[in-house]
């Protein structure tokens, strides 16, 4: 009889530890979601919005560090002019960001005006 009482007491004290382990086990995926997955999705969404907002004439930088102006847009490609008569075909996902908010045409007119002065 005494053995059953001690087993019953052990089961009652271990139920609190089991509940804590269950809560801890459920908290790990939640922490991973809020610390890793959610911020990564936000970054991907912002990058997709930025790439969708790019237009012909924008100055951009690629993931490999090449600066240039967008001259044409195809399905999932940008044509980027890096020098006179030198164009690269780049996948949209490799465009890292916009380097200036002004289109290329505005840059050319400001340079022409400064040269005339």
Image (tube, rainbow, N blue to C red):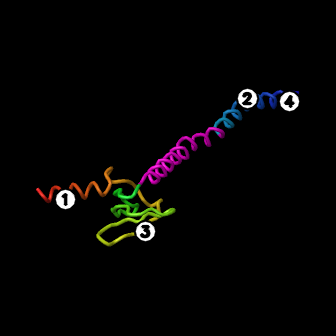
User: Residue at label 4?
Assistant: 4
- Give the mark nearest the N terminus, 1 or 2: 2
Residue 18 is left or right of residue 79, and the answer is right
Measured in 3D between alpha carbons, the distance from the residue under mark 1 to the one under mark 2, in whole angstroms, is: 83 Å
- Give the mark nearest the N terminus, 4 or 3: 4
Write down the quadrant of residue 26 in the picture: top right
Q: Residue at coordinates 70% horizontally, 30% vertically from top-left?
A: 16
Residue 88 is covered by the magenta coloring:
no
Q: Nearer the viewer, mark 2 or mark 4?
A: 2
Up-down: is 33 above or below 90?
Answer: above
- Give the mark nearest the N terminus, 4 or 1: 4
Magenta-colored span: 25-54
Residue 115 at x, y percent in the picture: 14, 59
User: Residue at label 2?
Assistant: 13
Measured in 3D between alpha carbons, the distance from the residue under mark 3 to the one under mark 1, in whole angstroms, is: 28 Å
Write down the quadrant of residue 21 in the picture: top right
Write down the quadrant of residue 117 in the picture: bottom left
Q: Residue at coordinates 88% horizontally, 27% vertically from top-left?
A: 1
The residue nearer to you, when weighing 100 against 10, is 100
- Give the mark nearest the N terminus, 2 or 4: 4
């Amino acid at each position: 009889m005494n053995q059953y009482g001690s087993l019953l007491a052990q089961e009652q004290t271990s139920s609190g530890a089991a509940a804590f382990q269950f809560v801890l086990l459920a908290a790990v995926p939640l922490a991973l979601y809020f610390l890793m997955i959610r911020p990564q999705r936000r970054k991907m969404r912002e990058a997709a919005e930025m790439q969708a907002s790019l237009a012909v004439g924008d100055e951009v930088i690629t993931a490999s560090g090449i600066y240039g102006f967008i001259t044409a847009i195809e399905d999932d490609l940008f044509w980027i002019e890096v020098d006179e008569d030198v164009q690269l075909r780049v996948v949209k996902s490799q465009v890292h960001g916009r380097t200036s908010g002004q289109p290329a045409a505005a840059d050319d007119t400001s340079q022409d005006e400064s040269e005339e002065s």
